[in-house]
Each structure stands twice: as C-alpha cells, then as structure tokens.
C-alpha cells in the first residue's frame, strides 16, 4: 500500500474533526513517503497567524509587543516570531521588502498605506481585501477591510 493510498484510513483514524481543526489553525499532517506543498507553513503564514493571535491587544505608539503594539511593531513582532527580522518603522519595512503588484499580492504580504511617496501605516494581508493591523491610539489589533486604494504591497523575503 502506498503512502497516498493510506491517507483515507489515516484520516478516518485521526477523525474528521481533528483534521478540520488542524486545517483551521494552519497545521499540516506529515505522512511518511508523501511530500506535499502544505508540509510546512511559510514564514508569511506564520506571521499572519501570530498577528491574528494578538487580536484585541491595545494600540500604543512605539510598542513592539508582546501585549501592546503600534502598526509596524505588530508586523515586526509577527515576522520575528515567524523567524524573519524586519526594521522598526513602516517606511523602513517597505524599503526592505520585495515590492509586488496588487494583482500579485498573497496572504501574508505586507500592505503599506501611503500618501504620495510617504508610507504612514502597515498591516499584514489576510486575503479578501482585509488586513490584520494595529490601527491607532484608542483602538486594538484587529482584522479590517482595506479602506483606500493608496496602498503598496511588499513581500518579506
């Protein structure tokens, strides 16, 4: 019996609920002899999971976590936990990323909000035109729809 043929019996033993729970949290199932693209989470997806786990954390200017964040502090913290270092400010982070088009953006890319050539805010793209970010004083880390077309995208390499 090949590893691919064992998948249904392994899934039955593990239980559908366990597999769905694993999928919901971005996990993977390793099967001997079966290589899949989903065998390891990417740095970007790990960073996105970290940012989402900080939902409700208060915004505080200059804060880099683990309990309070400003926008670039959240992205810095999230990518650091995923194993990648970023500079401190949104503008520095933009300059450090590989710039991608809106049509080429992927979940886990950074979304940079700009006015003219000045970057003033950053979040992590969550798909469906939404980002995880630390918005402003008096607010908390949350998932929000992108509210403007004045954005650039950057991929952490």
Image: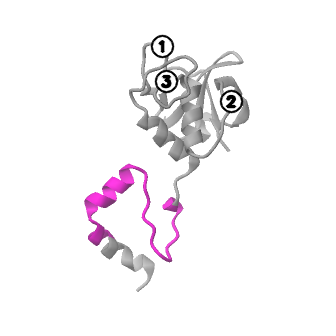
Left or right: 104, with 40 as reference point? right
Of residues 97 and 114, which is closer to you in this image? 97
Identify the residue position indicated by label 2 in the image: 94
Residue 94 picture location, percent across and down: 68, 29
Image position of 50 with respect to 72: above or below: below
The furthest residue to the bottom:
1
Residue density around tag 2, few if under 14, some if 14–19, many if 20 or more, within 10 Å: many
Check residue 134 in the rendering and tell me which mark sits there, or answer none. 3
Q: Residue at x 57, y 27 (%)?
A: 73
Residue 88 picture location, percent across and down: 66, 27
| Residues shaded magenta | 11-39
Badges 3 and 1: C-beta atoms under 8 Å apart? no
Left or right: 60, with 89 as reference point? left
| Quarter the N terminus occupies | bottom left
Left or right: 74, with 58 as reference point? right
| C-alpha distance separating marks 3 and 2 | 17 Å
Determine if residue 60 is in view.
yes
Image position of 126 with respect to 15: above or below: above
Q: Nearer the viewer, mark 3 or mark 2?
A: 3
Q: Quadrant of residue 90?
A: top right
Identify the residue position indicated by label 1 in the image: 137
Residue 70 picture location, percent across and down: 54, 22
Element marked by disc 3:
loop
| C-alpha distance separating marks 1 and 2 | 22 Å
Residue 121 painted magenta: no
Q: Residue at x 32, y 69 (%)?
A: 11
Residue 38 painted magenta: yes
Q: Nearer the viewer, mark 1 or mark 2?
A: 1
Please tell me which of labels 1 and 2 falls first in the chain: 2
Residue density around tag 1, few if under 14, some if 14–19, many if 20 or more, within 10 Å: few
């Amino acid at each position: 019996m090949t590893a691919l043929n064992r998948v249904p019996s392994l899934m039955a033993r593990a239980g559908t609920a366990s597999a769905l729970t694993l999928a919901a949290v971005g996990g993977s199932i390793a099967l001997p002899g079966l290589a899949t693209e989903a065998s390891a989470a990417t740095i970007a997806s790990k960073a996105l999971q970290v940012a989402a786990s900080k939902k409700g954390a208060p915004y505080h200017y200059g804060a880099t976590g683990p309990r309070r964040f400003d926008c670039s502090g959240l992205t810095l913290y999230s990518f650091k936990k995923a194993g990648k270092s970023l500079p401190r400010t949104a503008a520095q982070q933009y300059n450090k990323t590989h710039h991608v088009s809106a049509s080429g953006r992927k979940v886990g890319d950074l979304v940079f909000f700009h006015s003219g050539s000045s970057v003033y805010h950053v979040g992590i793209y969550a798909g469906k035109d939404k980002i995880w970010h630390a918005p402003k004083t008096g607010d908390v880390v949350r998932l929000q729809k992108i509210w403007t077309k004045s954005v650039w995208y950057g991929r952490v390499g």
